[in-house]
Amino acid sequence: MPDLLYENRVEHISTLLWDLLVFYVKSFLYICEAFFLSLVPTKYRQLKDVKNQVVLITGGGGGVGKLMSLNFARLQARVVIWDINQEAINTTIDLLESEGYRCKGYVVDLANREKITETMKVVRQEIGPVHILINNAGTVCCKPLWDLPEKVIENTYAVNILSHYWTVKGCLDDMIENGGHIVTVASVAGMLGTYGCTDYSATKFACIGFHEALYTELRTHGHDRVNMTLVCPYYINTGMFAGVRPRLMPMLEPQHVADSIVSAVRKNEVNCVLPDSVRLMMPLKHWLPAKASWEMMARVMKGPNSMMLFKGRGRVAAG
Ligand SMILES: NC(=O)c1ccc[n+]([C@@H]2O[C@H](COP(=O)([O-])OP(=O)(O)OC[C@H]3O[C@@H](n4cnc5c(N)ncnc54)[C@H](O)[C@@H]3O)[C@@H](O)[C@H]2O)c1
């Protein structure tokens, strides 16, 4: 890496001016590229070929994970799913088999570090090195902090963020050598603190930090063959947030989210915010005074009121 401690001030200023010039020129080109690509329909884009690639999806037994499994299978990928729930794994396997695809499932509690590390090794032996890792599983309890049991807080952290360290560590060497793709499923709740989600929101903020920091590390050390995608969806109609009635926008449909994630992976997109309009609204949080942001959240969006309707799946999160 170039040394940043310059001997004299003139050298410091001249290199800074040069770097700024390169930055402006490259940024202009990248903005043009992004604008152009946004106009090109997906069917005319060059997409990553995932045929025969090992795609590991955590939480693949339900919701978006199950639909992504089918999408990847249809693209001839070798799909591996992990889930805490054997029955859920079976429904995904049956779904894929009904279309003539195979899928391997492993029961893994993502709160258990040893089990994750051990199963990563088993997958490598039985299937092969993982090419695409989708850290998708998540858990939510939705209670204000004073009602949130300690065990639930710990479990939310273990599943929603700590597991990402152990899964990535289990396949990063292979990805650095062969190329690969790490997908982090965060949430809009990781961009905006959400009522009843001191644990959930905090872990999703951490997912974003994890993605950005690892992206920096990989690029800095020239591991450009490892791609990364951060996914931040708004509410999805999978049942995870059952009962919640958002005021301004309807929940996203799970199939649309699964299709968008697979498409983002195949386009090597670094950020995937769903819906796209949220990306435009988010800066308001930083520009508006805090009291105005609160008015927006509580009066216009009625965020806390809608979250108070949370029923979820009617079970308390494990832990
Ligand atoms: N549903 C939403 O409104 C929404 C919104 C934004 C982001 N997300 C995120 O998207 C991802 C997928 O959400 P979804 O709606 O499909 O969820 P889901 O609840 O429908 O499915 C999650 C799957 O993860 C599994 N799982 C839960 N805990 C586990 C554990 N400890 N070990 C292994 N597997 C476990 C579940 O059995 C389930 O099959 C999650 O990370 C979630 O936080 C969801």
Image (spheres, rainbow, N blue to C red):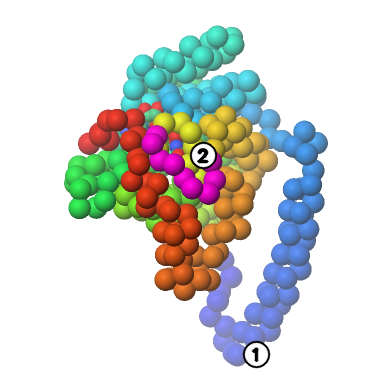
**Could one spot residue 121 in this view of the protein?**
no
Q: Secondary structure at mark 1?
A: helix
Q: Which quarter of the rendering shows the C terminus?
A: top left
Q: What residue is at 61 percent from the left and 37 percent from the top?
A: 260
* Quarter of image, ligand 1: top left
What percent of the width, then of the height, locates residue 141?
A: 30, 40
Say which of 1 and 60 sits in front: 60
Q: What residue is at 57 percent from the left and 53 percent from the top?
A: 278
- Tell me the magenta residue range: 242-251
Instruction: Kindly report the secondary structure that dominates the magenta region of the rendered protein.
Output: loop
Q: Residue furthest bottom?
A: 9
What percent of the width, then of the height, locates residue 187?
A: 47, 46
Kind of residue sitting beneath label 1:
Val
Q: Residues within 10 Å of mark 2 (few under 14, many from 20)?
A: some
Q: What residue is at 59 percent from the left and 11 percent from the top?
A: 99
What percent of the width, then of the height, locates residue 92?
A: 47, 18
- Of the numbered discs in the image, which one, if any, rests on residue 251? 2
What percent of the width, then of the height, locates residue 30?
A: 73, 58
Q: Secondary structure at mark 2?
A: loop
Residue tagged by mark 1? 10
Earlier sequence position, callout 2 versus callout 1: 1
Say which of 312 and 27 sits in front: 312
Inter-mark Cα distance, 2 to 1: 55 Å
Kind of residue sitting beneath label 2:
Met
In the image, residue 63 above or below residue 93: below
